[in-house]
Amino acid sequence: MIRKLAICSVAWAAMTGSPALAQEIAVKLGVLNDRSGIYADLSGEGSVVAARMAVEDFKAADKGMKVEIISADHQNKPDIGSNIARQWYDVDGVNAILDVPTSSVALAVADITTEKNGVLIDSGAGSTSLTREQCRPTTVHWTYDTAALATGTGAAMTKAGGKKWFFLTADYAFGHSLEENTIRVVENSGGEVVGKVNVPFPAQDFSSFLLQAQGSGADVIGLANAGGDTVNAIKQASEFGITQAGQKMAALLFFVTDVHALGAETAQGLSLTEAFYWDQNDDTRAWSKRFMDIHGAQPTMVQAGVYSGTMAYLAAVEAVGSADDGKAVVAKMKEMEFNDPLFGKVTVRGDGRAIHDMYLFEVKSPDQSEGEWDLYNQISSITGDEAFLPMLDECDFTKM
Amino acid sequence: MFELLGVPPQVLLGQLLLGLINGSFYAVLSLGLAVIFGLLNIINFAHGALYMAGAFAAWMLLHYLGIGYWPALILAPLIVGAFGIVLERTMLSRLYHLDHLYGLLLTFGLALIIQGLFRNYYGISGLPYQIPDLLSGGHNLGFMFLPNYRAWVVAASVLVCFGTWFMIEKTRLGAYLRAATENPILVGAFGVNVPLMIMLTYGFGVALAGFAGVLAAPIYSVNPTMGEQLIIVVFAVVVIGGMGSIMGAIVTGYMLGLIEGLTRVFYPEGSAVVIFVIMAIVLMIKPEGLFGRPA
């Protein structure tokens, strides 16, 4: 009898399993971004910090998950990015790659990710191709894309009376696609394009082009460029009295770190669209303060997106019970709804596009600004359905 | 109304003026390069990085010590010049007896290191630097709005360029310098301290780069790559003007600024390459450069 009881209890223990004996879910995340080039400030080490904060806040260890984070610099070169991604999946056993700014690198990594059945949670890249022409079942595009920025800034400014647009376009694929996206939105909102000029990339001096824009009689000067080019263009527009004379500047891809680089004095009045700003509500402020304490700068939307995307990914891995099958984890993410402290309500569409609100901001004037990072006034919010392009049927992986 | 290829003369005049302003930067930078090459035979690839360092020095003076634009206009070139002297003493001076290529490689490496250090500490986005109050605002010239600061840039650069040319070509000190380049041993035998003169010349050349950096800080983005983007163009300017020719560097600097300005009106896409096209043509027709003496 005693022996029978003993056997029973052993069997019972084996069936239910104690937590200590349960299989631990091992997850390895790779933050792949620009750590030394033009996108290093908006992604870079800050994105790694954000990913670590996500693992901490997810309380992965308490949930029986062992999460490890590694990082690398893709130098904005697709070949280097591809090599790292391959090595990560093949040798290092990485389950998911995070961030990946620079669209050309992101598109290359998206292909490798599908091939290796990993997961790409992209925060830094802007190309809409990630969830359209080159959509993949293992891609999630979290933070923004050029269409959302164009919709936010283009539509809002046209409706606010900026009917005539003049574009200064960086003369390469990215600039042209940003210009094209914005023109479509402007024309749909009842505006017109009175002129444009293709500016060689990169450029230091924009004065000639700005003067052409000034002479065109446009209401809005759309800057279809990024980084240092945009900074130079805005700095010089203010110098030539263009903003003071009433023409508005619309930065079509601009981050809070860029505005910080310009200073409120020069950037004041500039309109731009972002998915996140540190000073939006108590949650974003609290999180950003923690981030600032570690990183020494306020988070950009890209870094915040790495945090939210990582949280969502870990939740999906927990639900699936393993990180091995990338497709299954992404499919799970598409079934879930995330209530995120930074991005609010987020869902992931069948094509991998994360849908959340976007916000139109205007840069404060120096008298309104109470600190070096107190830079934006929120003008309006744009719902995710309005901001992002509609899904292409052939990209709806939930139906396949 | 008179129009040239569909461009009204007012617009053209405005663009020419802007070209002149850009030419001012080219002139000051290529002047420094020409002085260093003409007198030291060093192809100073660190020039762009030192131009950037000049802009950063101005920012640091303001940010850490509260020193404004005007003192920085003197102090920043002095700081950059002193740094250049250290470089010359500790490294460059060991290479004078070797081929040009070694100096080029050394200064190229130094440029990457300097740029990397700034990027590491100050990030890539750049730092804000305002136009000094005295020069903010501008005047409406009828055909364009000319910011006061840009007018100042042209004036300052003409002054500095002319001063340097005068010193090297028309004074006794300049004569020593030129003689020391021709035959350092003979000039040394006359009791002139040639190494000191060479050291100060290098210091002066890079101080010019620092000066251009301070001039640029209020209108261009102050970031670690600002020099990298400009240096190649400036080298082309020096090559077109004739390596080592002081007058050549100055005149070509302004002239190419004008040509680039015109290209921006008629064919903006080509404005980034027009200088290099001219360089290729000049090298084919007159390899020693427009103002160079045949070797």
Image: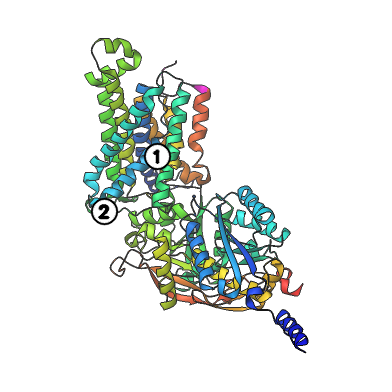
Q: Which residue is mark 1?
A: B49
Q: Quadrant of residue B33?
A: top left
* Identity of the residue furthest to the front in this view: A2
Say which of marks 1 and 2 sits in front.
Answer: 1
Location of residue A38 in the rendering, given as x and y in whole percent from the top left corner: 48, 52
Location of residue B123 in the rendering, given as x and y in whole percent from the top left corner: 42, 52
**Is B288 contained in the magenta span?**
yes
Q: Of the residues shown, which amino acid type is indicated by label 2?
A: Ser
Between A119 and B240, the residue placed more toward the observer is A119
Disc sitting over residue B136 in the figure: 2
Q: Which chain does the residue under circle 2 lie in?
A: B
Q: Which chain does the residue under circle 1 lie in?
A: B
Between B73 and A56, the residue placed more toward the observer is A56
User: Is residue B72 among the parts visible in the rendering?
Assistant: yes
Q: Is residue A132 above or below residue A90?
A: below
**Is B276 contained in the magenta span?**
no
Q: Which residues are magenta?
A: B285-294
Q: Of the residues shown, which amino acid type is indicated by label 1?
A: Ala
